[in-house]
Amino acid sequence: MGRGRRDKVLLTIEQRRRLENISRNGYAPAKKILHARVLLMCDEGEQAIDKWTDEGIALALNLHRNTVGRIRKRYLTQGEEPALNRKLRKKPPTPPKIDGATEAQIIAMCCSDPPEGRADWTIRLLTSELKKRRVVTEISRETVRRTFKKNQLRPWKVKRFCIPERDLARFVAQMEVILDLYCSSHCRDQPLICMDEASVQLLDHLYKPIKMQPGQDQKEDYHYTREGTQALFMFFDPNAGWRRVSNRDHRSRVDWAEEIRQLLDVDYPHALKVKLVCDNLNTHNIASLYEAFPADEAHRLARRLEIYHTPRNGSWLNVAEIELSILTKQCLARRISSPEKLEKKLKAWEQERNKTASQVIWHFSTPDARVKLKHLYPVFEEEEMADSNAPN
């Protein structure tokens, strides 16, 4: 064969072994394998068996002659790696679809109130509003979605939280009283009881539901009838794992006082004093006993009752809420049509729940609160500033 080329490719033994491994292993990219074969056929060193021209290599590998020449020239000028790997094409930078001013308007509109009649912004709604208000003449929903993602905007998601009251000193004072109470030991003569209230709506089926069968889910009609509401009173002993829940037509002072009398005289008749944790409703005080009963009876009950109020916006400190949440999921997540049926189902749940004697073991203490909730302590910032200004 004729030579037909000026520059020679001279591969060492190690280079040939490496290129042969690449061309045979089958794991490298197809372009890299092809370029390795081209370099092996271009070799004119002592290890080369045949001498190939560019035309012969191109014909054997089904390539153009100029492609073979470019690979050989890249090896001679730049080295082995640039000759093996495919040269990446530099793509021209894509101009942004929207500029900074338009993006700022999209963010401002997304953070504003949605149009009248809409609960929140959606990508489709915001895209149409941008065109309607002539912020842009043309924009796609994908561009709006990328703007949301870039700026971490999620208008369809709402986080709920409880803001402590403005009087932080009062909040932390009441909080520490409750925390110390939970972390203290309690005997049978002075039990710790947590109570909370809730309301439930009574609903009845307009049409009889169809029961579940193999291969068929239970079905019930969307229509229902309202049968009134009931007030729930939950009493929970977190140390003994005992709870009692009852339903009443109202949640007045008299209702609360009657529930307290049942707690003291029926549930804990031998207790010298009951420590009651409840929230800050105006019915949860000793005055309700005097409104419901004669003075002698109210005084007798009040002497055996010690009330601890959770701070405002601090209902998370009342563990009775845990039991109410479990009650809602396990028992009340269905339609109940009458107070009698509700009472029957509550008693069945109460008996089954008391068999397990599930307790609540409280670990969050006052020292923990002073670390994790230090932003609630009004004097904390002054102490930190004094420490930072103190000489070393």
Image (cartoon, helix red, strand yellow):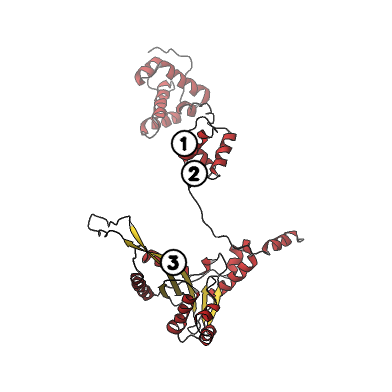
Mark 1, other Cα within 10 Å: few <14 / some 14–19 / many ≥20 = some
**Pointers 2 and 1 in contact (CB under 8 A)?**
no
Q: Earlier in the sequence, mark 2 or mark 1?
A: 2
Residue 172: which quarter of the image? bottom right
- Indicate the secondary structure of the residue bearing disc 1: helix
* Whole-number angstrom distance, CA of label 2 to CA of label 3: 33 Å
Could you tell me the amino acid type at mark 1?
Arg
Could you tell me the amino acid type at mark 3?
Ser
Q: Earlier in the sequence, mark 2 or mark 3?
A: 2
Q: Nearer the viewer, residue 305 or 7?
A: 305
- Indicate the secondary structure of the residue bearing disc 2: loop
Residue 345 in view of the camera: yes
Image quadrant containing the C terminus = bottom right
Mark 2, other Cα within 10 Å: few <14 / some 14–19 / many ≥20 = many
Q: Nearer the viewer, residue 366 or 287?
A: 287
Mark nearest the camera among 2 and 3 is 3
User: Vertical placement of 162 versus 87: above or below?
Assistant: below
Name the disc covering residue 199, or none: 3
Name the disc covering residue 141, or none: 1
Residue 342 in the image: state x and y as whole percent.
Answer: 35, 70
User: Vertical placement of 324 versus 301: above or below?
Assistant: above
Name the disc covering residue 121, or none: 2
Residue 384 in the image: state x and y as whole percent.
Answer: 69, 61
Could you tell me the amino acid type at mark 2?
Trp
Mark 3, other Cα within 10 Å: few <14 / some 14–19 / many ≥20 = some
* Whole-number angstrom distance, CA of label 3 to CA of label 1: 44 Å
